[in-house]
Image (tube, coloured by chain):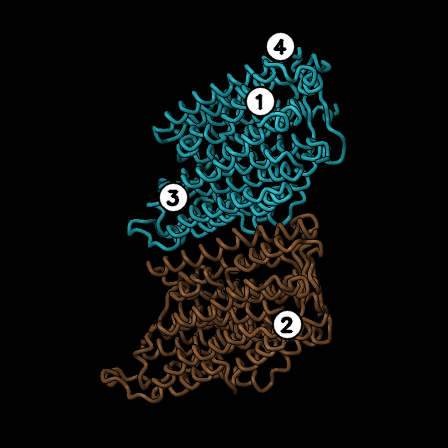
Amino acid sequence: MSAADLILWALALPALGAAGIALAGRTPNLREAVTLASAAALFLCVVSLLPGVLAGARPEVSVLEPLPGLAVAFSVEPLGMLFALVASGLWIVNSVYSIGYMRGNGEAHQTRFYVCFALSLTAAIGIAFAANLLTLFLFYEMLTLITYPLVTHHGTDAARRGGRIYLAILMGTSVLFLLPAIVYTWVAAGTLDFRAGGILPATMGALPLGVLLALYMFGIGKAALMPVHRWLPAAMVAPTPVSALLHAVAVVKAGVFSVVKIVVYVFGLDALAGATDWLMAVAGFTILAASVVALKADNLKRRLAYSTVSQLSYVVLAAAVLAPLSMIGAAVHIAAHALGKITLFFAAGSIYTAAHKTEVSELDGIGRRMPWTMAAFAIGALSMIGLPPAAGFVSKWYMLSGAIADARWVVVAVIAASTLLNAGYFLPVVHRAFFRAPGTDDAQHPHGEAPLPMVIAVVLTAAGTVALFFVPDMPLALARGMLEAR
Amino acid sequence: MNIAPHLPALQVVVPLICAPLAVLLRRGTPAFLVTTLASWTAFAIAIALWLQTAAGPPISYEIGSWAPPWGIEYRVDRLSSFVLLLVSGMAALMLPYSRASIEREIPADQHYLFYAMFALCLTGLLGITITGDAFNVFVFLEISSLSTYVLIALGRDRRALVAAYQYLVMGTIGATFIVIGIGLLYLMTGTLNMADMASRLPDVRATRPVLAALAFLTVGISLKLALFPLHQWLPNAYTYAPSAVSAFLAATATKVSVYLLIRFFYAVFGADATVRALPLGEILMALSIAAMFVASAMAVFQDNAKRMFAYSSVAQIGYITLGISFDSVTGMTAALVHLFNHAVTKGALFLLLGGAAAVYGGTALGRLAGMGRVMPLTSLGIVVGGLSLIGVPGTAGFVSKWYLILAAVQAGQWWIVAAIVGSSLLAIAYVWRFVEVAYLRDPPAAAPLRREAPAGLLVPACILVAATIYFGLDTRLTVGSAAGAAAMLLGGGK
């Protein structure tokens, strides 16, 4: 099979899977088998593209041309490869986890859930492999729409409110800012293709360039830069597997992925020199402010949501520094944070399923009953803080190196302060779980670990987090590949 | 006999003959068959004409072999063939729908009258589009208007009578203005042929009667196309008319009026005398933007889905006239593309709502709670149509919005870009009111169990929903025709 075919299969497989899931809706076991099979097939498909991309190939395929000169086209470059690998790989683990969670909690409308889940993977892969801004925008909006039913899954008033905020911010920012930015780029550059070194004409003044950058950065609401971050905590009304895959991996990573991609391939690092100071300020503020909110949040999922807001801005901050080393940090952080945060969300969902607990203050001594889950949680927390032996250390190392090389001391200070804040809101959870005595009423509600599929999933992602620390070669190679073509 | 040269005449004559035939047949089913056949023939003719003009020069047809400017000329160029295709295509799709629809909404003894009126309305709309004679425009306008009043009055709700009467009053004022305008033009140029008029007008351009004619025509046509704030007739008419009529009117009637405005502005008076010499472009732009915001905001607060989408139509017409007001090829392309795309989208929406009305007995949002579970296909179709109204990529509406924003950026008018995207947010708000009602509310206990609309209603609607997506992904037909027509109108320059 040619690389172009593989790209199209990667897009088609989750969609075909969704159709299969819908058809198999009446027999849950078959339905889940279809989910797992399509997840595995997708991952295989994406992995088979990897050797070529590492060797420098950039396979392309064009599908249709909705506007004259503007095609829906796909092209695999290293950064997209990395995002696609993360999204498709974690879909497998997440499917295993979802099966345990959805059955364990007796959730309704499970077929709809799995169908939307599969379709959202098509959208994520479309974003990863988009060859131009039009294609990116098409799948970006598709991802928003297809995840809306997942966010409002419970159909309650709270879900409706969360869904409203989710949709209003994500769609509102993309229509208000992203679309005009894309049209402006088209008028200014005459093309929307992602090209190494950027596409904007060198004659563009500083003011239009700054405005365009702002339109993109706030137009990509999925990157959750403050003040357009509110959708992320609002989306936590969703079932935990949704929060895990979509709001630790696919949706938010689609956001920061688009940010990095646009900075590298639309603007070009050289063109932006000096134009990103305000972006560093906004990203730095988001990192610290979100961490402070997380520090105060007692609800575990809310704490994780704000931690995500903060961690996403690491990527934006690193991209705004524009130094090659920090760009590598930004790219690797997409993978590192995904693995760490999905572990944390998995753990939160396991706690909810096994113990029906949602607040941090209820977790005293839970590590004794759920050792596997809480050990995994500890590893995820280490990754967020950026300590060895977890993947977060690698990306933070590169981000700091880039900032120091460029003598951006404020950036260094922000990352340092954020490390402390991260420790401040994650370590107490670990401490409560392992070193405090269980509450008195816990004795009346005995529980052990969550269902087996969930434990397997959480252990797998925790292991991945550690593995990425010891063997970060592949993401690093891809991140360097992104910069090499300049 | 070779009929190919006579296709322009047959385009109008076929549906025209069909109307008295339907009355003579006096029974629903034969009248339905004759009208459907006529509409399909008209569609086939429109396709043939479109293919001819896409490849070759404009067609000029002399009625009764009387040469213009004395005789009546039918003129098929890239613009009119595009609109003919749209109008006849919609009729061909909606007639099969109407059979299943009017069975529920109109007493059986009036069915043949419905088909006769439908055929007359189609005749009028096609006639306005194809004719090159200004007085002939007025004649066809009256044919389409009078039949439309009757069609609206056939609605089951008694308020349909009031709505029809309201439209009758407003429409008559509009038609009177138009005929006064045409009369003044005849007075000053001595001709009724539009091309001839265009060549003679520059000599008398600055005279008061010509300016008065322009004013009368602009206001008269704006009434018919429901330009804000002359749109008052539209929401009631669309809400209370029979479902098939709402859909047909939303998809064609206002669009043909927009076409007429473009014809008079750019082909008869010429852009130099209208949007460039007078502040007409600015006025049109201001009213369009007001329409986009005020009508969209009104739509958000409606409690009836049909009425909500009727207000949305007023707003969407604002996008079309906004495109015209740019006075650029891109702007005109945007206007024409949206004219087509909005017709497809709104046609689909009203057809689907007709299906919902058949199952629920009405389209009040309160009744439609939980519709996503009862009528999954219909609800999904309405959502797709709604996404097209918002302008989500992958739908026809996105293509329109793309060109509209492009035109604003090219003109360097950033505040208009802001207005376009800002009003899209209102579209999200009203579309999502439906989404929440349909998917996030439980069906009331008395609601029908899963029951889609009958196939006769569902299939034509689904074809249009598919078209909404198709024209978002393949724009050779829409953008190709629109860009060609825009270049023709604006001389390829600017």
Q: Amino acid at mark 3?
A: Val
The disc label shown at residue B359, or none: 3
Q: How many residues crowd around disc 3 within 10 Å: few (fewer than 14), some, or many (20 or more)?
A: some
Expressed as whole percent of the image width and height from the top left, the position of residue B24 reads 51, 20
Q: Which residue is mark 4?
A: B187
The quarter of the displayed image where residue A260 is located: bottom right
**Residue sitting at 52 percent across and 26 percent down?**
B222
Q: CA distance from mark 3 to mark 2?
A: 62 Å
> Looking at this view, is A294 or B54 the one in front?
A294
Q: Read off the chain for label 2.
A: A
Q: Quadrant of the C terminus of chain B?
A: top right
> Looking at this view, is B17 or A38 the one in front?
A38
Q: Which residue is mark 1?
A: B16
Look at the picture and state if A16 lies above or below B216: below
Q: Read off the chain for label 3.
A: B
A105 displayed left or right of B68 = left
- Whether discs 4 and 2 lie on one chain: the answer is no
Chain letter for the brown colouring in the rendering = A
**Residue sitting at 34 percent across and 54 percent down?**
B441
Q: CA distance from mark 1 to mark 2?
A: 73 Å
The quarter of the displayed image where residue B155 is located: top left
Look at the picture and state if A164 lies above or below A477: above
Q: Which mark sits nearer the N-terminus, 1 or 4?
A: 1
Expressed as whole percent of the image width and height from the top left, the position of residue B386 reads 48, 47
Look at the picture and state if A141 lies above or below B310: below
